[in-house]
Image: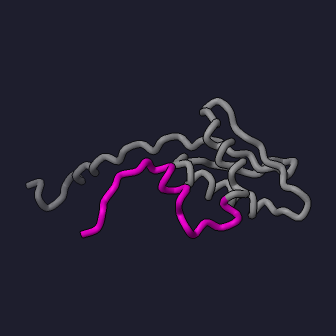
Amino acid sequence: MPRITTIPLDQAKARLKRRTPEHADRAAYREAITNMTMERMIELEPEAGETLRKLRLNVNRAAKEVGRSIEYDESDSGTLLVWLALPAKPRTPRKPKSGSVGDK
């Protein structure tokens, strides 16, 4: 019989074997996204040799790692603007069509 123990999520994630080197590189993104509010956004300027596509990819991955939903767009000066996404509205069931077969 296996031994079953319960540990906090942050401890479990810290003990994972397969962490990529890029995971450590995204620490600054994760911290910035964690500290974001609905009133404030972050602006990222690519380093030399870095593309906006790579920035978007890293920001998306970091947001998923901290469990936040974000949106982003490119500014006119070539930087990446990132903000928290508004919560999605809950879906409601469709209303029945008038004049359908069951409405006689």
The magenta stretch spans residue 72: no
Q: Residue at x 53, y 40 (%)?
A: 86
Quarter-wise, where is residue 5 in the image? bottom left
Which range is magenta?
1-23
Q: Which residue lies furthest to the top in this view?
A: 39
Is 23 left or right of 79, judged from the image as shown?
left
Is 64 left or right of 9, judged from the image as shown?
right
Q: Residue at x 19, y 55 (%)?
A: 99
Is 29 left or right of 75, judged from the image as shown?
left
**Considering only vertical position in the picture, is 74 above or below 21?**
above
**Considering only vertical position in the picture, is 92 above or below 41?**
below
Q: Which residue is drawn at 70% across and 63% down?
A: 22
Q: Position of residue 101 (x, y in %)?
A: 14, 61
The magenta stretch spans residue 16: yes
Count of numbered circles in the view: 0
Instruction: Name the magenta segment's main secondary structure.
Output: loop
